[in-house]
Amino acid sequence: MLTVLKILTLFLTMLTLAPGLAHLFELPNKIGLPRDAYFIVQGIYAGWAWLGVVIFSAIAANLALAWRLWRHNRRSALFAVTSAGLIVISLGIFFTWTFPANQATLNWTTIPDDWERLRTAWEYSHAVNALINTVAFLATSIATSGTTTPSRRHSAP
């Protein structure tokens, strides 16, 4: 059962990373687009709000893994807790900069006067979250690769 939890946790954490990396890699090509082109491109994100389910599932899975590992491998458990914490921080960044830009533009269907400021906040908050979620994924990778029982040294007869 622990193996299944490790694989699930690693998979869910990887899924939190994938959209952020997509945003990060497209940023250089999108940040300078003219207004109308930018708003057209933003339409590709319709439905991405469902990724919130994955994000909250990854947090829960990392915490469940930490709880399961705590007795036998505190180091791995702490890496899982760290990953969950980093994902929570990424949510804080999302709700501080990304979500308000989505709200102000009605999910990029309405063009407010300060759209360029909103674009900057939206793009760079996703870039920062890509980096944070990369570290979270690495922490989960370490947590899932550790041993789960105390190691025993066997002496030669």
Image: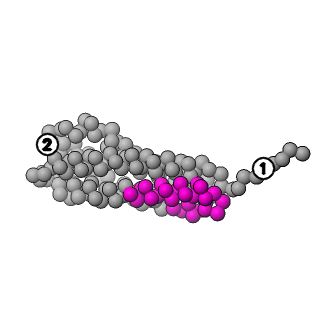
Dot 1 alpha-carbon crowd within 10 angstroms: few under 14, some 14 to 19, many 20 or more? few
**Residue that appears at 37% across and 46% down:** 130
**Residue that appears at 59% across and 55% down:** 75
Q: Identity of the amino acid at label 1?
A: Arg
What's the distance in space between the residues labelled 2 and 1, CA to CA?
65 Å
Horizontal and vertical percent position of residue 127: 32, 45
Magenta range is: 62-89
Q: Nearer the viewer, residue 68 or 5?
A: 68
Kindly identify which residue carries mark 2: 35
Q: Is residue 2 above or below residue 124?
A: below
* Quarter of the figure with the C terminus: top right
Asked if the stretch drawn in magenta spans residue 26, the answer is no
Kindly identify which residue carries mark 1: 153
Tell me if 113 is positioned left or right of 32 in this view: left
- Secondary structure of the residue carrying tag 2 is helix
Q: Can residue 19 be seen in this view?
A: no
Dot 2 alpha-carbon crowd within 10 angstroms: few under 14, some 14 to 19, many 20 or more? few
Q: Identity of the amino acid at label 2?
A: Arg
* Dominant SS in magenta: helix
Horizontal and vertical percent position of residue 155: 84, 47
Asked if the stretch drawn in magenta spans residue 66, the answer is yes
